[in-house]
Amino acid sequence: MKIAVIAHDGKKAEMVGFLLENKEKLEGAEICATGTTGSHAERGGLVVTKYLSGPVGGDAQIATLVAEKKLDVVLFFRDPLGKHAHEPDIQMLMRLCDVHNIPLATNPAGAQLLLDGLYQKGV
């Protein structure tokens, strides 16, 4: 299982907390992340493969993995109230998840349901 994790600046601590709370469920999964989110996750003691920071192409790199069907799940904790210069990349990533039927959770509640379902299924 390969999971991409992305979080806007105001959601990075929430993402790391979520990952740490679900460490058992993520055991055996390969986690990749945009650069800054990945750095935060590493400081939390997690092992991640880091791509570029979102605003400089990381979202597009993750979108490429989606298009190539090299990801199983995308967890993207978005800040819906903030402005983001890389919004076109964000929209592209979300659209590609829909096009290629890749599960996408954009908040902790959805991510928890997704992980719980995968964990119960034994994936």
Image: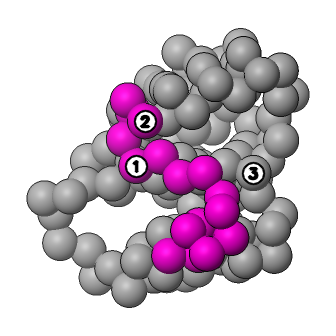
- Mark 3 belongs to which amino acid? Asp
The answer to the question of whether label 1 and label 3 lie on touching residues, with beta carbons closer than 8 A, is no
The structure residue drawn at horizontal position 33% and vertical position 79%, both measured from the top left corner, is 87
Q: Is residue 58 visible?
A: no
**Residue 10's spot in the image, x, y percent?**
26, 47
- For label 1, the residue is 106
Q: Does 66 sit above or below residue 89?
A: above
Give the secondary structure at mark 1: loop
Q: Earlier in the sequence, mark 3 or mark 2?
A: 3
Q: Earlier in the sequence, mark 1 or mark 3?
A: 3
- Mark 2 belongs to which amino acid? Gly
Residue 39 falls inside the magenta stretch: no
Q: CA distance from mark 1 to mark 3?
A: 15 Å
Give the secondary structure at mark 2: helix
The picture quadrant where one finds residue 69 is bottom right
**Residue 68's spot in the image, x, y percent?**
81, 76
The answer to the question of whether label 1 and label 2 lie on touching residues, with beta carbons closer than 8 A, is yes
Q: CA distance from mark 1 to mark 2?
A: 7 Å
Q: Is residue 114 visible?
A: yes
**The C terminus lies in quadrant:** top right
Q: Does 63 sit above or below residue 22?
A: below
- For label 2, the residue is 110
Q: Nearer the viewer, residue 8 or 100?
A: 100
The picture quadrant where one finds residue 15 is top left
Chain part drawn in magenta: 95-110
Give the secondary structure at mark 3: loop
Residue 72, disc = 3
